Amino acid sequence: MNNDRYSRQVRYPAIGDAGQEALGQSTALIVGCGALGSVIANTLARAGVGTLRIVDRDFLETSNLQRQMLYDEADVESNLPKAIVAAEKLRRINSSIVVEPHVVDVDAANIEALSKGVDVILDATDNFEIRFLINDVAVKHSIPWIYGGCLGADGQTMTILPNTSACLRCLMLEGPPLPGTMPTCDSAGILASIINVIGSIQANEAMKILSGNKQSISKSLTIVELWQNQFRQMDVSKLRDQVDCPTCKGRQFDWLDGRQGSHSAVLCGRNAVQLSPPERQPLDLEKLASSLESVGQVTRNRFLMKLAVDDFELTLFPDGRAIINGTEDVAVARKLYAQYVGN
Amino acid sequence: MIKRVLLFASAKETLGQDSVDLELAADATVADLRKQLVNDYPVLNDLVARSHIAVDQQFALDDMSLTDAREVALIPPVSGG
C-alpha cells in the first residue's frame, strides 16, 4: 500500500495505522448505488475499505445526474447499469481496492448470499420494504447496518448494531408504511445537498465500525432539516429494552422468510415500475431482441436490452427482471411485460 | 395543559408550519397526543400513526406520560435515497 495515500486520514487519531489496516481488510455491502450509494461508495473507496460490494438494479437516466455524484453525461449515454458504471469509476479512484458490482434486485432469495462475509451493510435504497429485508438479514447474522433516507431537504440516519442496539423493527413495530402512503422524490423533490450530508454520516458510521471504533457509534436517530440548518438527535439507546421486538427478540424474520414483500415496485422519482417475476426465468436477450425488432426500437448491450414502443420503454435484464418506464401503474407495466416478453 | 408539538419532514410540509399547540389533559400520554393531533388535524391521519414521537429528544412509547415533557416532536420516517 502506498503510505502517502491515506496519510491524512491515518493522522486522525481515531483511525491511526491500526484503523487504516482494519479498513483495508474490511468488506462493505452497499445496497443501492443511486444518490446515497454514490456518496457512500465514493467516500469508502477513497478511505481504502478493502472490498466494496455494490448492488443496484437500475440503469442511469438524465434526471439522476442532479444528485448521483458518481455519474456523468457519458455514463447516461452508455446505457450501462449503475453498478457497472460505479465499479469502473471507483476502480479509477482507487485501484488498490476490490469492487464487486452486482446488477440484481435485492430480494429475500439473494440477500443472504450478497451479505455473506460482509462487515457492514449500508442502506442506500429508496423504500422501507427493502430496509426491513436488510434489517432481517442483519439481525439474523449479526451484521451492523446503517439506515439512511432523504426527501426534499430532510434526511434521517440510524446505525443498528444487531442484538445490542434497537433495530429498525424496534423503531417501527408495525412494519413499513403501505406503498403509496409515503411521499416520494417525485412528489416532494430532493436536493443533492441533503444526500451528501446523510450519505457522509452513513459512510462515517461505517468507518467507525470498520476501523475498530464501535464505541463511538451514534445511539440516536439523526434528523437533519438542511434548509433550516437544523440537526437533531432522537435517543434510541433504551428502545431495545423497552419493546418486545419480533425481529431482534423473537428472531422472527418475516421479510427474509418471504412472508412479507412484493414482486413489483414503483421506482422513486422515475415514472417507472420494476417487475421481478417470483420464479426467475432467465431471459435470452439476444433472441428477444431479434423478435422485438419489428415491434419498436431495440437497443442492447452486455447487461440489458431496451425496447421503445409507443410512450413506454421496457428495459429487460438477463435475470428476468424488467423496468417499465412511462408509467407508475403496476397493472399497466404487467400488461406490457406480458405483451412483449410473455408471462 | 397546552403542549407544543414540533413537526418534521412530511408533517411540516403537510400543515405548512413547523409546530402546533395541542390542548391535552394534565395526565395525557403519547397515545392521547396522537389522538388529539388527528382530531385537530385530520389531514395528518395516516402520518401520525406511523411517525415517531420524541419527548425531550428521546424516543417515546405510547404509554409515556407527557406531564413533565418539555419538548415534543412528531418525526415521520423518511424514505427516499
Image (cartoon, coloured by chain):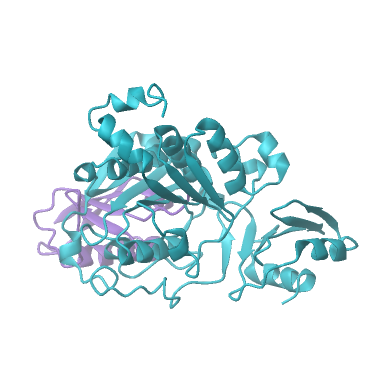
| Furthest-front residue in this view | A1
Note whether residue A172 is visible: no
Q: Chain letter for purple, please.
A: B
The residue positioned 72% from the left and 52% from the top of the image is A302
Q: Which is more toward the observer, A66 or A11?
A: A11
Note whether residue B67 is visible: yes
Number of numbered discs on residues: 0
Which quadrant is home to the C terminus of chain A? Answer: bottom right
Q: Which is more toward the observer, A310 or A94?
A: A94
Residue A245 image position (x, y, % from top left): 25, 70
The residue positioned 52% from the left and 31% from the top of the image is A93
Give left or right: position of A189 versus B30.
right
Colour seen for chain A: cyan
The part of the image, by quadrant, that contains residue A253 is bottom left
Give left or right: position of A184 versus A21.
right
Residue A92 image position (x, y, % from top left): 56, 32
Residue A46 image position (x, y, % from top left): 44, 32
Q: Height in image: A13 above or below A26?
A: above
Residue B53 image position (x, y, % from top left): 25, 57
Q: Which is more toward the observer, A253 or A16?
A: A16
